[in-house]
């Protein structure tokens, strides 16, 4: 616990709205896209989710850091958020699993944050005006000068970021127990729990860099192809779309989540667009049209697929349709591809079925992937 008062800090949005608070985490200055997360738990998973790369995350839950930080719940090798905004940080963490405070973790990893901010007012502003660029500084109190730097910073639209967060070397997550399948998983910002969920089902997961080619995928003789979540604009991510199209042509079973859903949509010929403020939290209701069930789901996305909600669309790879819809705003939350006989060939969802810190309603999707591979022909490229 610090023995001195925190330094003053300011937050300036690109439309000029300014909030004053106190330095939290590392001192300094940072820029990114301001977004808000509505989850009341799981801040450690949020911070280490690569999909938040270059984003300044505003937590709507007022008390953050209560359970400190442990060494088991990281979703990746580091914290990825560009900045962190909280209202009332915990003074002393309280959990038997905690090994250090969140403030210390942010400071150690160089993450600039701000506390004491009216996060309710800030969230309402972002809901009304949309996600926008933002700057946080504890080195200056000159809002006008900081605003100029905010407006000179990069925008999320049109930016390719998957290659910045992906692994540089392929690695294998072995199956638990008896191996049933081999999956090539393209790391576009994968969360560690995702291959674990597959491993629990007897899948040996070969996690490959985002820059992998079709030859790299076929080299592992996969029974299926998986695309992970990840940051950036799907319209600016082209090589992975071409890879997916080539895989679909060969009939390789496919499952994608989040960014993998958006790239699947583009591979099928649909467009993508930027949502006003996105979906980020662990309480989003989604209808699975294939079962008629409503799931409470975990989300982290600022882009969505532009596909017709009704009817099927004929593509070069089969008949594509929307399988999942968000009940809050009718955003496309899933796609499926079927052959002429109606058999499933590939599918994707816009949310996170691995949801380590969230609901587990969607865990069945990994079983659906297993069923898809079970029903498919022997290994492609074997």
Image (spheres, rainbow, N blue to C red):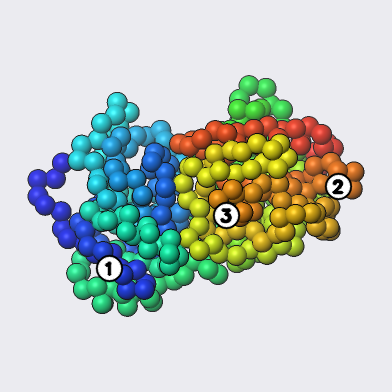
- The CA distance from mark 1 to mark 3 is 29 Å
The residue beneath circle 3 is 329
Above or below, 159 relative to 193: below
Give x and y (percent) for residue 133: 40, 68
Task: State which tag comes first along the sequence, 2 or 1.
Answer: 1
Alpha carbons under labels 2 and 1: distance apart: 53 Å
Point out the tag, 3 or 2, that comes first from the N-terminus: 3
Of circles 2 and 1, the one toward us is 1
Task: Look at the numbered disc 1 and give the secondary structure of its residue.
Answer: strand
Q: Nearest the camera: 62 or 33?
A: 62
In whole angstroms, how far apart are the C-alphas of marks 3 and 2? 29 Å
Numbered mark located on residue 180 in the image: none
Q: Mark 1 points at which residue?
A: 18
Task: Establish if 269 lies above or below 66.
Answer: below
The quarter holding residue 91 reads: top left
Residue sitting at 40 percent across and 72 percent down?
153
Name the residue at 24% across, 47% down.
Answer: 88
Residue 27: image location, x then y, percent: 23, 58
Residue 339 got which mark? 2
Alpha-carbon neighbours of circle 3 within 10 Å: few (<14), some, or many (≥20)? few
Q: Nearer the viewer, mark 3 or mark 2?
A: 3
Q: Is mark 2 on a helix, strand or loop?
A: loop
Residue 51 rendering spot, x and y as whole percentages: 49, 52
Q: Look at the numbered discs 2 and 1 and tell me whether their residues touch, using CB distance below 8 Å.
A: no
């Amino acid at each position: 616990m610090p023995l001195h008062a925190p330094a003053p800090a300011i937050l300036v949005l690109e439309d000029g709205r300014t909030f004053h608070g106190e330095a939290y985490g590392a001192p300094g200055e940072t820029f990114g896209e301001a977004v808000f997360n509505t989850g009341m738990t799981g801040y450690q998973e949020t911070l280490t989710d690569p999909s938040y790369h270059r984003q300044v995350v505003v937590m709507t839950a007022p008390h953050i850091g209560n359970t400190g930080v442990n060494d088991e719940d990281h979703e990746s090798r580091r914290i990825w958020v560009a900045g962190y905004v909280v209202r009332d940080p915990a003074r002393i963490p309280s959990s038997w699993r905690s090994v250090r405070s969140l403030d210390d973790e942010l400071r150690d990893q160089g993450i600039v944050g701000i506390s004491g901010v009216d996060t309710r007012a800030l969230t309402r502003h972002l809901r009304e005006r949309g996600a926008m660029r933002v700057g946080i500084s504890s080195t200056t109190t000159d809002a006008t000068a900081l605003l100029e730097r905010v407006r000179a910073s990069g925008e999320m639209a049109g930016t390719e970021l998957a290659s910045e967060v992906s692994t540089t070397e392929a690695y294998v997550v072995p199956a638990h127990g008896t191996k049933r399948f081999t999956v090539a998983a393209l790391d576009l910002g994968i969360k560690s729990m995702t291959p674990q969920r597959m491993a629990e089902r007897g899948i040996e997961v070969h996690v490959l860099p985002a820059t992998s080619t079709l030859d790299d995928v076929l080299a592992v003789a996969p029974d299926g192809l998986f695309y992970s979540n990840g940051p950036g604009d799907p319209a600016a991510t082209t090589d992975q779309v071409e890879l997916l199209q080539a895989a679909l042509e060969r009939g390789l079973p496919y499952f994608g989540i989040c960014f993998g859903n958006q790239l699947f949509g583009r591979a099928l010929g649909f467009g993508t667009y930027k949502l006003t403020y996105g979906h980020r939290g662990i309480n989003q209701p989604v209808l699975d049209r294939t079962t008629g069930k409503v799931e409470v789901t975990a989300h982290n996305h600022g882009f969505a697929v532009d596909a017709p909600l009704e009817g099927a669309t004929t593509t070069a790879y089969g008949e594509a349709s929307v399988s999942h819809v968000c009940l809050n705003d009718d955003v496309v939350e899933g796609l499926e591809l079927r052959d002429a006989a109606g058999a499933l060939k590939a599918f994707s969802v816009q949310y996170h079925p691995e949801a380590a810190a969230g609901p587990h309603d969607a865990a069945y999707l990994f079983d659906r992937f297993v069923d898809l591979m079970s029903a498919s022909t022997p290994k492609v490229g074997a």
